[in-house]
Amino acid sequence: MFIINITFCVPPEVQGAWLECINKMVLPLLKQTPYCGELLLTRVLHDVPQPDHSYSLQVHVAHATDVQKFNDECMSEIARTMQLAFPEKVYFFKTILKKV
């Protein structure tokens, strides 16, 4: 089992539009992708106030080959969506976790 974690840094001025984009475009894409299992969208909490909000989108996949499929298929679509909707506003990075 692998978890693909995408962390997004979202400035307050686009937070509402970003959440709408995630809920209407990104999550439906992932839900219809056969190798994507459980999806979890959370807000990252900080001890010290931050100017931007951080969010984590976790996607569970079963196999290492699914991670590669995700990179090839879904990640490029997420990147394209973020670039078109929020150019130079929303930044993100991906980490891969292996369940132990």
Image (cartoon, helix red, strand yellow):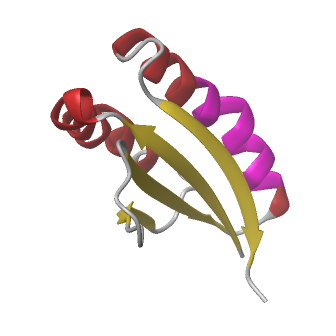
Q: Residue furthest front?
A: 48
Q: Nearer the viewer, residue 85 or 27?
A: 85
Q: Is residue 59 above or below residue 19?
A: below
Q: How many marks?
A: 0
Image coords of residue 10 (percent x, y)? 37, 37
x 73%, y 42%: residue: 69
x 34%, y 59%: residue: 49
x 80%, y 45%: residue: 68
From the viewer's perspective, is 24 left or right of 46?
left
Residue 29 seen in this snapshot = yes
For the C terminus, give its image quadrant: bottom right
Image coords of residue 79 (percent x, y)? 56, 24
Q: Which residues are magenta?
A: 65-76
Q: Is residue 56 above or below residue 29?
A: below
From the viewer's perspective, is 38 left or right of 21?
right
Q: Nearer the viewer, residue 57 or 59?
A: 57
x 31%, y 32%: residue: 25
From the viewer's perspective, is 61 left or right of 31?
right
Image coords of residue 71 (percent x, y)? 72, 38
Q: Nearer the viewer, residue 65 or 75?
A: 75
Majority secondary structure of the magenta segment?
helix
Q: Is residue 64 above or below residue 16?
A: below
Q: Nearer the viewer, residue 22 or 11?
A: 11
Q: Is residue 7 above or below residue 10?
A: below
